[in-house]
Image (cartoon, grey):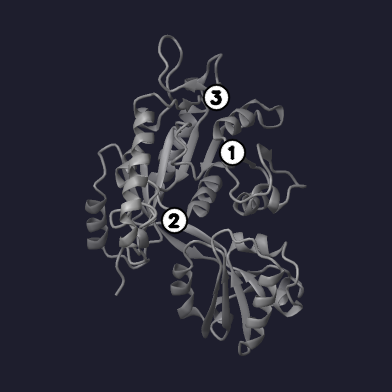
Amino acid sequence: MRTEGDFIKVNEWLMPLSWLYGVGVLVRNKLFDLGVLKQKSYSIPVISVGNITVGGSGKTPHVEYLVNLLKDRVKTAVLSRGYKRKSKGYILADHSVTMSDIGDEPFQMARKFDNVYVAVDRDRRNGINRLTGDSETSDVDVILLDDAFQHRYVKPGINILLVDYHRLIIYDKLLPAGRLREPMNGKARADMVIITKCPKDLKPMEFRVLTKAMDLYPYQDLFFTTIEYGELVKVWNTDGDNGRTMTNEQLKDMNVMLLTGIASPKQMVNDLSPLCKSITMMAFGDHHAFCRKDADRINEMFATMPLPRIIITTEKDAVRLEETDGLAEEVRNALYVQPICVRFMLGQEEDFNNKIISYVHKNSRNSILAKGKNDHKPKDSDNTGHRPGTISFRDN
């Protein structure tokens, strides 16, 4: 039977270490709350999307949703730390950048959105300063921070917290026993909370139970999203346009190898199993860097599968597989990427969109409300005197 939080596994024997970890996180958060560790706010709209669990809550498709919402209205930038990239410092994606330079998820977005700035920097404050100060990106109107909920040195105008339906934070434990990066009360910093990956057939009573269980403050908005799967698309198209995509009707007779390097592949297994003849799973760790040895394993397993057969992978895995040597020609011809996007439930899409657009327009430096000689210069969040205060969603 399906239940919320059904993917959670807690290692009880590690709870003493979780307690020590929790003390360290508590001290760090208290130092920020007291102003000992300084946050910076910016007079350009900054929207953070993140979570308080390790991996797998759907950050990238939600950031892409925001990009699609804003890119035709204002000049939009995405700033990520570039997890597992082989470079250091600030890098702005251009046509010459590689996946190794900026990481798989930023590379995925840079390739998907031509008219959007995509940059990486572990130091988000420096990244924002570069995006707003460098001449090539000085026209930016809004910055989306990818995976920055714990990066408290930046104070965003809107803080969006994502919570996986299958790993609800109310049932999880702190690292290393569970997968929480910080105690559940950290959710109080969020302006919006989105429960992601909800089953499409969630009943009204279940929505009410989840709303009560999350126990949010009056200033916080709760939204629910589910995953929508697009048509499969070939990673390497060798058959021309006619063979580039595969419909669900074609998929139902296929034996599928599901090849992933993501934090939570179980959701994809559950969703795709009813759509195909069989699924063979080959799972690697999140953001796994595929090597020649991995390619040999993939080739061998695929060769043993019954016909007809294909391989399905995720968008971020596809960008890493494209740089992998040793994949057999048969594997390359059979490799499809599964595009995903998010859909708001309960008719909440319009409300969410309006809140985001209203915040951005009110606080844009092109808005009369945001004009001033100190526009897009950083300010300490505990500033006093005549300097402008923090642009906050809660004030709009």
Among the 4 quarters of the image, the one containing residue 168: bottom left
For badge 2, the amino acid type reads Ser
Q: For the residue marked with disc 3, what is the amino acid?
A: Arg
Whether residue 303 is situated above or below residue 111 in the rendered picture: below
Mark 2 nearby-residue class (10 Å; few <14, some 14–19, many ≥20): many
Find disc 3 in the rendering and name its residue: 365
**Vertical position of residue 20 compared to residue 280: above or below:** above
User: Callout 3: helix, strand or loop?
Assistant: loop
Q: Position of residue 99 (x, y in %)?
A: 69, 53
Between the residue at mark 3 and the residue at mark 2, the CA separation in whole angstroms equals 32 Å
Q: What residue is disc 1 on?
A: 76
The residues bearing labels 1 and 3 have C-alpha atoms spaced at a distance of 13 Å
Give the position of the N terminus as an image quadrant. bottom left
- Residue at horizontal 64%, vertical 61%? 289
Q: Which percent across, then down, holds residue 293? A: 69, 71
What amino acid does circle 1 point to?
Thr
Circle nearer the N terminus (2, 1): 2
- Label 2 – label 1 distance at C-alpha: 23 Å
Q: Which residue is mark 2?
A: 57
